Image: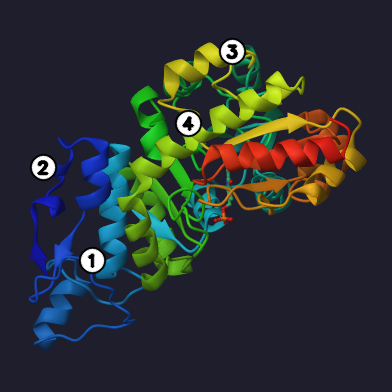
Amino acid sequence: MKKTTGSDPAVTARWRPATQAVRAGTLRSQHGETSEALFLTSGFTYDSAEEVAARFAGEAEGMQYSRFKNPTVEMLQQRIAAMEGAEACLAQASGMAAMTSALLCMLSAGDHVVAGRAAFGSCRWILDNVLNRFGIEHTVVDGTDNAAWEAAVQPNTKAFFFETPANPTMDLVDLEFVCGLARSKGIVTVVDNAFATPVLQRPMDFGADVVAYSATKLMDGQGRVMAGAVCGSQQWIDDYLSPFQRNTGPICAPFNAWVVLKGLETLDLRAHRQSENSVQVAKFLEDRGLRVLHPWLASHPQHDLAKKQMKAAGPIFAFFAPKGQQQAMALCNALELIDISNNIGDSKSLMCHPASTTHYNMGAEGRAAAGIEDGMLRLNVGLEDPLDLLEDLDQALGKVGL
Ligand SMILES: *Cc1c(COP(=O)(O)O)cnc(C)c1O
């Protein structure tokens, strides 16, 4: 592989985000292809037995086996690391493989985790059903409440784990405060940044140690593949994540890595356009008299914090059918353009009723405690002309008496 200016981290660190998204991490084969090459190979061959021995001893650079390293996956990792401002990144098979690996690789029996209460359903499931079984306990706090984070810290607290904005309540965590608190106590902060991506929010700029992604969402952005990524310091990756991942194997397939690489090229454009579209749609619903939770609207209780730590709020927000679940479902059914789907980050606008889908497994009590009401709807605003989306919402709202 030939190096390019994009494969020199000292150069890519100086680039602006849109440039990093297109060029960081690029390696070229002897053919000099413009688009990143897709290496669909599990193994590699060597010129000599001494060469392979040197690679296994860590004395020579190069590939050995795609569970350890693959050139296409390597390009994706370098590109995400550059965009995140991180020293290193490893890619995984899905967002959940990323979250599970980030936690399991460094936690041991007897450790304690503090987690934000509003979280992706499977993230809560890992805490309740996987970590618990291995003697790793956790406390769930209202992530918006700085004092609650402080009060939940125990002598054995090893990690803080949260999303911001959180799914689907759009609660924010004060990154500077919570990451600063963790630093002062030697606690590792793991931020699930899937909603915002590094284009809209870089948690490491506020002191986060580890940033984990579902690349399935806005990074791919066109609903094609599952993938994940975890960013951290070189030392954290070398000491914890890399050995864990090399030996347990939740790795990203080269094809999926290639699709996400191409997705990243348009991420800056998509993230900003979808954010603008989503503000326009959210305002329309608010003007219609509906309760809306959108961090970029002045009505959001943490609007000032959103403006401080995010460049834009992203494509996703929540709103409420005042009469509850039946009306919320009827509204979904009345849509003609916007699809009913639990996916997010897609260039297609998608609506979902969290209480009966993504957050169904939490049970009514769990949902009430997490602020997920029966009438709540989550909307991912895509790249369609927002006027067409407003027309669709207008006719659908009319059909359910709103
Ligand atoms: C989707 C999502 C995940 C899980 O990612 P997958 O790629 O579906 O495994 C984790 N966290 C958040 C915030 C998500 O939106």
Residue at mark 1 to residue at mark 3: CA–CA distance: 42 Å
Please state which amino acid type lies under the numbered disc 3.
Ala
Please state which amino acid type lies under the numbered disc 2.
Val
Residue 36 circle label: 1
Q: Nearer the viewer, mark 4 or mark 3?
A: 4
Q: Label 4: which residue?
A: 276
Marks 4 and 3 in Cβ contact (< 8 Å): no
Residue at mark 2 to residue at mark 4: CA–CA distance: 31 Å
Q: Nearer the viewer, mark 3 or mark 2?
A: 3
Please state which amino acid type lies under the numbered disc 1.
Glu
Pick the residue in front: 270 or 308. 270
Q: Label 2: which residue?
A: 11
Marks 2 and 4 in Cβ contact (< 8 Å): no
- Dot 4 crowding, Cα within 10 Å, few <14, some 14–19, many 20+: many
Residue 230, percent across and down?
41, 49
Residue 298 circle label: 3
